[in-house]
Image (cartoon, helix red, strand yellow):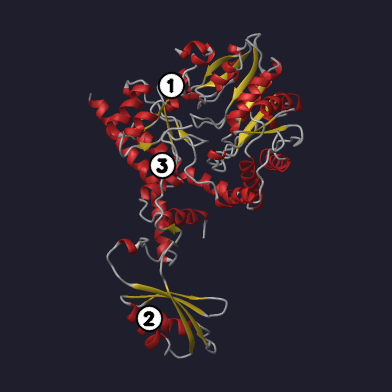
Amino acid sequence: MNNLSHKVLDILKADCRTPLEDISVMLGEDSVKIAAEIDKLQKDGVILKYMPVINWDKTDRQFVEAIIEVKVTPQKEEGFDTIAKNIYQYEEVRSVFLVSGMYDLLILAEAPTLKELALFVSEKLSVIDFVTATSTSFILKRYKQDGVIFEIPTRDRRLLVSP
Amino acid sequence: MSERFVNPTISNLPQSGIRKFFNIAQEIPNVISLGIGEPDFVTPYPIRRHAIDSLLNGETQYTENAGLIRLREEIVYYLKTRFSLEYNPKTEIVVTVGASEAIDIVLRATLSLGDEVILQDPGYVSYAPCIIMAGAIPVPVKTRSENEFQLTAADIEEKITDKTRAILLSYPNNPTGSILSLECMQDIANLAVKHDLFIISDEIYNELVYDGNTQPSFASLNGMRDRCVTINGFSKAFAMTGQRVGYLCAPEGIAKQALKIHQYTVLCVCRTSQAAAIAALKTGKETDYKDVIMMRESYDRRRRLMHSALVNMGLSCVEPKGAFYAFPSIASTGLSSDEFCERLLKEEAVVCVPGSAFGEGGEGHIRCCYATDIDKMKEAFLRMNRFIQRLKEE
């Protein structure tokens, strides 16, 4: 990846709605070149999706989320990939990571109610072949996600005119 | 009636023109300020953490007048590795309450009644008053947009008299955002030697230079170290404005005298702030100044955005190369810079600082700071554009 793609990604990471023209001005590069760069990043699968960071607590949508640690027996020649694939196909599963430490896979899952999430763990996740143990932690409060701090008003403490 | 007790030299000093609109601006809802002259970043976390730890460890005493020796050593290392400057931490550095105090005590330590000091116009608001308070006379030399606001030796030489003692320079410059070419610096250095003047170089914005440009430190020029006072601080590069830590570097003969004033007036800089400053330099050294670079890159993007927007509004504007200010000309609107800023604030709720606040040479310009949130900046551009179009129809 070249330097320009890093710079473009930096800007999009901070605000993926930044207009093409602004990116072009900010980086001092032709907008056609920037458009081609973004296009390439998308085609290459570097940029997969543009999504907002939502504070659901401020909406009336009710749902529960949990972090589930999963212990599995890795498969010959396939390692953890097939098991991960079996897990991520469920709509309850938001993210799956292979991790080091006490457990093998870390899952972020969500469901409309506590009961539904519990059923997902007991009836869908735990019964997948080679899953040997799970440990579920329900998310109670979100403080920071994807670099964004929740619930703290970002007040500008500077004087209006200075120094 | 208490006025009769007041020193007329002080009462005759104007109030800072930067703060002029502060009271009006506070009353206006949804105001967007491009008039703030400080980073929009909070001091990086490791620096704040270190300040807290210092307090919790009970480091609450006075320090050496010149500042903690560890801090002075870190400053010397920083200046050596980043700006090719060589100073002795024991005798040539004084840690001050921001660069502001450094300016004051250097002027008081060096100037006598009636001495003249050359300074660039437009220039930062505190220079002329500090020179006057030191009993000396400020001699402004105008810089021009055609020359990217660079101070030239030829313009300086016209103003030199047998009373001239020093040249006070500040590049990267507030308010113009300009830097000074090595060639201009060398010419000024030669002039200083020719007329036996000393240089006070305020380099507070020296980490904020863009587009592959650099701003060498004046004292790093051949033969300049012993006739130069370098002033710098932590406010801009490390986003530490409220912690008030600056420093001066000078040959021992000057530093020793400046230290006396510091000793008798300030005693020492807040110890907690000094601890924060040590952390800033140590963390910087260990991380290749990652935070400084991240902030600079962020300003750089906004710098381009602002310059492009001002030009698109029809204002002529030299591309700023340093600090975090653009200084467009508003002469085409037919308004004075004061009128322009006052009407812009009242009609469109955008604060800019009139160029006249920085000296006569700033008239016809406004200072716009791009250390401002991008969304707010873009809204400010919309409002400014609307205002300028309306002026055309009047």
Question: Which chain does the numbered disc 2 sit on?
Answer: A
B80 above or below B141? below
Q: Specify whether residue B260 is in view.
A: yes
Q: Are marks 1 and 2 on the same chain?
A: no
Residue occupying the point 67% across, 24% down: B261
Q: Which residue is mark 1?
A: B356
**Residue A65 position in % (x across, y down):** 38, 73
Amino acid carrying mark 2 in the image:
Gln
Neighbours of disc 2 within 10 Å: few (<14), some (14-19), many (20+): few
Q: Which residue is mark 3?
A: B305
Q: CA distance from mark 3 to mark 1?
A: 25 Å
**Residue B167 position in % (x across, y down):** 62, 20
Task: Judge depth for marks 1 and 2 and give the one in front.
Answer: 1
Amino acid carrying mark 3 in the image:
Leu
Neighbours of disc 1 within 10 Å: few (<14), some (14-19), many (20+): many
Contact flag, marks 3 and 2 (Cβ < 8 Å): no
**Residue B170 position in % (x across, y down):** 57, 28
Q: Which residue is mark 2?
A: A89
Residue occupying the point 50% across, 46% down: B42
Q: CA distance from mark 1 to mark 2?
A: 66 Å
